[in-house]
Image: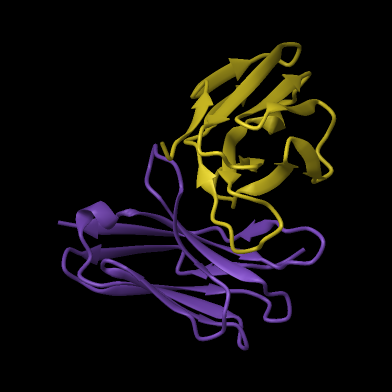
Amino acid sequence: DTEVTQTPKHLVMGMTNKKSLKCEQHMGHRAMYWYKQKAKKPPELMFVYSYEKLSINESVPSRFSPECPNSSLLNLHLHALQPEDSALYLCASSQDWGQGGEKLFFGSGTQLSVL
Amino acid sequence: ILNVEQSPQSLHVQEGDSTNFTCSFPSSNFYALHWYRWETAKSPEALFVMTLNGDEKKKGRISATLNTKEGYSYLYIKGSQPEDSATYLCALNSGGSNYKLTFGKGTLLTVNP
């Protein structure tokens, strides 16, 4: 199984809502990532978890709250988002983190619209 | 902020044509260079990870070369097929204390039958 599964595929939420994005992998990977991609822009790193510990937070606003309950799961909790947070949110995993040559396995993303 | 540039932004070729695109990066900030293929409505898929100057990698009709001294990588597709239509992203890992990828904007390839 070389899949990274993300749910939901699409999400529409209001600025006062609380929602969560979920990501799952069963490849035994120890590193998991959240990326954000806006239209016509490259994917931008948000968070990196390594061995279930937060290793990188790219100065992401606190209205985005990541969680790694175990090595196979990664969540992104959303609260009080702004319309400019509308984007494609990609989850990825890799065998390890900090090795440089590790390729990433991506999910197909959650397309988020904030109204 | 690292600048990873890809050119061209988009490319239309006929089936059977061979094509290539470029990824440029700061040569002073190099640890590894990744190439990904991203088909519409699917997940980005890793093609190659290259770490050494002069590296050449091949996967079927697709190959890539790396020049870390001058800061560029080429991706070549031989005999393009409609199923090669996708966005091709390169990403630089500059190493250091933060092992993270900085992506380019990608090259959108459309192969017409």
Q: Is residue B23 left or right of residue A75?
A: left
Query: Residue at coordinates 66% horizontally, 18% vertically from top-left?
Result: A20
Q: What chain is the yellow one? A: A
Vertical comparison of B7 with A30: above or below: below
Residue A88 drawn above or below residue B9? above
Q: Nearer the viewer, residue A99 or A8?
A: A99
Residue B77: x %, y % from top left: 30, 70
Quadrant in the picture for residue B37: bottom left
Q: Residue at x 60, y 83 (%)?
A: B68
Residue A115 visible within the image: no
Residue situated in front as seen by the camera: B56 or B84 = B56
The residue at the far top in this view is A17
Residue B106 seen in the figure: yes
Please say which color scheme the image uses.
by chain
A83 lies above or below A96: above
Residue B74 x/y as whole percent: 45, 76
B105 relative to A22, above or below:
below
Q: Which residue corresponds to the image point at 48% horizontal and 81% vertical from the top-left? A: B55
Residue at image location 73% in from the left, 16% down from the top: A15
Which quadrant of the rendered structure holds the N terminus of chain A?
top left
Instruction: Answer with left or right where residue A66 lies relative to residue A72.
Output: right
Quadrant of the snapshot with the C terminus of chain A: top right
Q: Position of residue A106 (x, y in %)?
A: 51, 42
As drawn, the chain in purple is: B
Q: Position of residue B106 (x, y in %)?
A: 50, 59
Q: How many marks?
A: 0
